[in-house]
Image (cartoon, grey):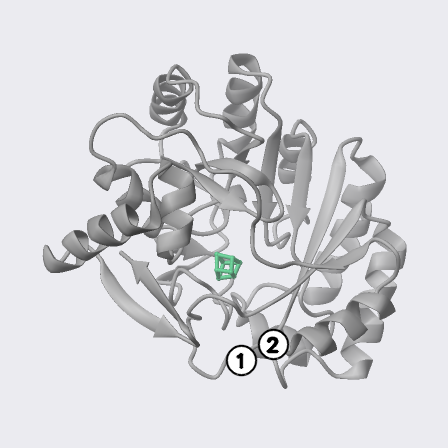
Amino acid sequence: MRHVFGPVPSRRLGFSLGVDPVVPKTCTLDCVYCELGPTTDRTVARKPYVPVDGILEELGARLAENPELDFITLSGSGEPTLNSDIGRLIDGIKAMTDVPLAVLTNGTLLTDPDVRAALARADVVAPSIDAVSRAAFDRVNRPHESLDPALIADALVTFAREYRGKIWLEVMFVQGLNDDSDEIERIAGIIDAVKPDKVHVNTVVRPPAAPHARALTPKRLQEIAERLGPAAEVIGSPTGSAQPEAEGDASDAIVAMAARRPVTTVDVARSVGISQAAAAKLLNELVERGVLSVVRHGETLYYRR
Ligand code: SF4
């Protein structure tokens, strides 16, 4: 399996080349909205799940193809800070390229000083915090039993005091699970303490792990964003130009991307630099070969591994 995927068009990060340091699906949480499906290994055990040297070799080969990138992003098949060599991975990437490096994390392991020290070398850290109360944390994030939301919130504040890069906090709202006014007030309190550079307010867009995970309306998201302060903005679909057309067969790149999150024909067209008709043809071929499956969510068809 490839550990470097994309570039993926992302509203938060522009064109982001994904680097995946864990294996599917390894996470400290089992969020109801997760695009990767249910967590198969819910753990807090930090290990070298994927050897860093192999990832760096793969990344070097991909960068030699000169893709147009806004970010290299550690994310993928679960929680990237579970890889105990993430500090060495970050250092290796920084030594290889000037492309800014972002880490998407659920923030649960920021209680570990080693994790905070490793992430300190990234340009952007994008932690998520969807709940502060125990009840909402259990409802939305379905955590490993050892995790305590109060300690995680404290660790996020500690990290924010130590860190010199940009913090882009993400809050994912799920209808009826963490969108009551008390929980929003608690989240606002953490935002006041962290003082992130940006707060991305999001909801369930792609097919979720749990069928009961439902999206908030755009109007309700906007109301919440206003309550969360001037750094908060509602996240929508990515916009902007497409990548130049990739050379050769794009199927492997599409499968690597769809293994990390369900993709639409528009995502594939923009990522691989082809027309939507050509993307639809490639995706349908992969479905016919049994490599991808197709699922309808709302009005949109998504393709996933
Ligand atoms: S959304 Fe992120 S934190 Fe939640 S289960 Fe999926 S990979 Fe883990």
According to the picture, the residue beneath numbered tag 1 turns out to be: 214
Residue 57 visible: yes
x and y percentages locating residue 48 in the rendered image? 41, 36
Q: How many labels does the image show?
A: 2
Q: In this view, does 272 lie above or below 107?
A: above
Horizontal placement of 232 versus 8: left or right?
A: right
Whether label 2 touches label 1, CB < 8 Å: yes
Residue type at mark 1: give it.
Arg
Foreground of the two, 2 or 153: 2
Q: Which of marks 2 and 1 is nearer the N terminus?
A: 2
Q: Is residue 145 above or below residue 211?
A: above
According to the picture, the residue beneath numbered tag 2 turns out to be: 174
- Which quadrant of the figure contains the C terminus? bottom left
x and y percentages locating residue 26 in the rendered image? 40, 53
Horizontal placement of 241 versus 282: left or right?
A: right
Foreground of the two, 300 or 160: 300
